[in-house]
Image (cartoon, coloured by chain):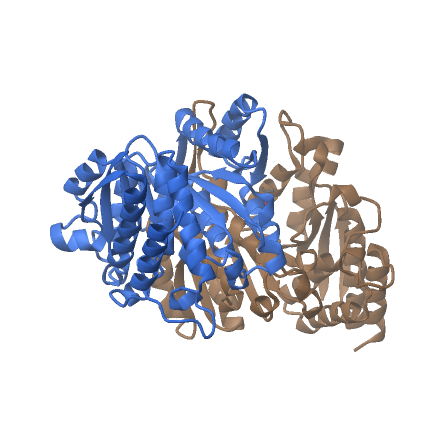
Chain colours: A blue, B brown
Amino acid sequence: MKLNIAVLAGDGIGPEISVQGVAVMSAVAKKFGHEVNYTDALCGAAAIDAVGDPFPEETFRICEAADAVLFSAVGDPKYDNDPEAKVRPEQGLLAMRKKLGLFANIRPVQTFECLIHKSPLKDELVRGADFVCIRELTGGMYFGEKQEGTEEAYDTNKYTRPEVERILKVAYQYAMQRRKHLTVVDKANVLASSRLWRKVAQEIAPQYPEVTTDYMYVDNAAMRMIQEPTFFDVMVTENTFGDILTDEGSCISGSMGLLPSASTGSSTPVFEPIHGSWPQAKGMNLANPLAQILSVAMLYEYFGLKAEGKLIRDAVDASLDANVRTPEIQVEGGGKYGTKEVGEWIVNWIENNA
Amino acid sequence: MKLNIAVLAGDGIGPEISVQGVAVMSAVAKKFGHEVNYTDALCGAAAIDAVGDPFPEETFRICEAADAVLFSAVGDPKYDNDPEAKVRPEQGLLAMRKKLGLFANIRPVQTFECLIHKSPLKDELVRGADFVCIRELTGGMYFGEKQEGTEEAYDTNKYTRPEVERILKVAYQYAMQRRKHLTVVDKANVLASSRLWRKVAQEIAPQYPEVTTDYMYVDNAAMRMIQEPTFFDVMVTENTFGDILTDEGSCISGSMGLLPSASTGSSTPVFEPIHGSWPQAKGMNLANPLAQILSVAMLYEYFGLKAEGKLIRDAVDASLDANVRTPEIQVEGGGKYGTKEVGEWIVNWIENNA
Ligand SMILES: CC(C)[C@H](C(=O)O)[C@@H](O)C(=O)O
Ligand SMILES: CC(C)[C@H](C(=O)O)[C@@H](O)C(=O)O
């Protein structure tokens, strides 16, 4: 297979983990005889500094022309702390989502046995949790009509039937590949937009008779995720609820630094870690590259290349088992490994295994 | 003091716990020489069955005329499972909030040492968690302009400056009575309504120089509450975010069945357990009356009657220590106590102590 990858390294620790993601991608490609071409592009604070726009037109064109985007992280404190800043790195994220039509944000939540003790939940509760949160990413309050104001202000949470249908279809497809259990999360007892979601879901559900669909109010889902995370298989919800629930979901695993995500839609899909740009650690060879590396696994899998994805997952598991870990997850008495050393170890493992 | 209390027992286990709440209220009143008059009023499914309205006009008048409302729970599965039902018990809740101007929902989250093991969080994380969630209750998407539809639908998340100001003032007053730490939760990086909240908060904050105010995005707050619940003292947020976060907050304590809440505003305040009507247990003398009883403590405290509130809290602690507990929190080998027995034990303790 031939793949053109746009590489958006972004800010903070982004460039360091990006290098490792690319190295792993190349090692796997070599092993399986794929040809991968990379094109770097600017985004985030780096792009604001360079051209005054967090998602420049040229970056958009590079992404659009690529088969997939390997994204790292954006964000810089110099913009966070300036309330007057007119352009912010996050706007680049929103622009990217909208311009690339990335309506489905997919976040697998899984636990790693060796990190269960890091979960804020009791071990026995979280052990075995393995679900996918699917968040609608280009509709709802994020993009609805807004009125700014110092006396009153509003946002509009609007959804159209096609917007709801397409994300539910993605959710059902995931459910079919997994344990066939879909939870549709909404607030249909209060919100008109949620009632539309529920109505459309009830119409689509019969097309997937093998899937058990249940409906849950968002307040209830926020609790259930903590009380019984193993209940969930695939969960789907609208943009704002999804923002809250996907973050809650990731943090219960104790493995935030290890979780990848995919955003897919009408144009080029984007693969990225769920964690941020950790500006304090920039250039210090401290950041865990595993979430970025697992994003590469998701990328391969997206193109149906399951063995490639599996090889990466096995390599990551092997690195954890061998205690080749960055400081924040290293065991007492374990060796010192930085971003680079972990990435190189994994590349090496891939070259010498399977 | 003379207090007129509207008693809204509602549905399911509501009537049973209501009786115990009233009994405790009376025992305390007698001890301190207060005069309390009770007026029962219909609400919820019971009111739909009787008069076709989950919050009838007469109930509203009784509440309005009272000094406080002692509320229990509403909800009945016969309405939940009927998507065609035009009137639902929950609408009674929303009508009550709106008509009584209950703009501030106050939910203390505390842990009880003897129930820490019931928390989904690791004991050492949740131990000592003690915070108050303040949720705006009559604005935002719940009450904003809506458009129902099967092709598109929307809700409007609108806030005006006075709505934001008054709830923030309540939050600052709580913070002043507590550890003087207020966390304002919003999504100001995306939502216009949140930017208004943040702007108003930044204007009001200097009026409370003793209070440390911090601002947190809602996705971050949903994580922080799990990762470090002891971080919070008072948290304030808008209606929809508050719905999610208050439920999340309650469930981490492991003591959901014990947590009371208050809703206050421009007219009569309402005191109620955070739990629901548990229809399956109706009439079975199984429900834990402690959340209802602690609602009575909040009620007394609202009127500045601190010793009265303290006496109730001490009685509740004593009942837990003595293992006089309903089945769901009873220790192995502990005696069998129902709603009635726990309530009576507490009344008895109050009569014979302090
Ligand atoms: C930065 C922000 C706009 C963004 C969002 O809320 O979508 C982030 O929190 C995320 O979840 O990707
Ligand atoms: C029943 C429902 C409308 C209500 C709400 O969301 O406000 C409930 O979840 C609550 O939190 O009191």
**Residue A23 percent coordinates (x, y):** 27, 52
**Residue A151 percent coordinates (x, y):** 33, 49
Along the horizontal axis of the image, is A53 left or right of A140?
left
**Depicted B164 relative to depicted A94: above or below:** below
Q: Is residue A175 visible?
A: yes
Q: Residue at x 37, y 45 (%)?
A: A297
**Depicted A133 relative to depicted A303: above or below:** below
Relative to the observer, which residue lies in front, B93 or A206? A206
**Residue A79 percent coordinates (x, y):** 24, 59
Q: Quadrant of residue B151?
A: top left
Q: Is residue B300 visible?
A: no
Q: Quadrant of residue A309?
A: top left
Q: Residue at x 34, y 33 (%)?
A: A265
Relative to the observer, which residue lies in front, A337 or A287? A337
Q: Quadrant of ligand 2?
A: top right
**Residue B44 percent coordinates (x, y):** 69, 39
Q: Residue furthest left?
A: A51
Along the horizontal axis of the image, is A224 left or right of B332?
left
Along the horizontal axis of the image, is A108 left or right of B280?
left
Q: Residue at x 27, y 50 (%)?
A: A22
Relative to the observer, which residue lies in front, B78 or A154? B78
Q: How many marks?
A: 0
Q: Residue furthest bottom?
A: B354
Relative to the observer, which residue lies in front, A190 or B2? A190
Along the horizontal axis of the image, is A92 left or right of B52?
left
Q: Quadrant of residue B353?
A: bottom right
Q: In which quadrant is the N terminus of chain A drawn?
A: top left
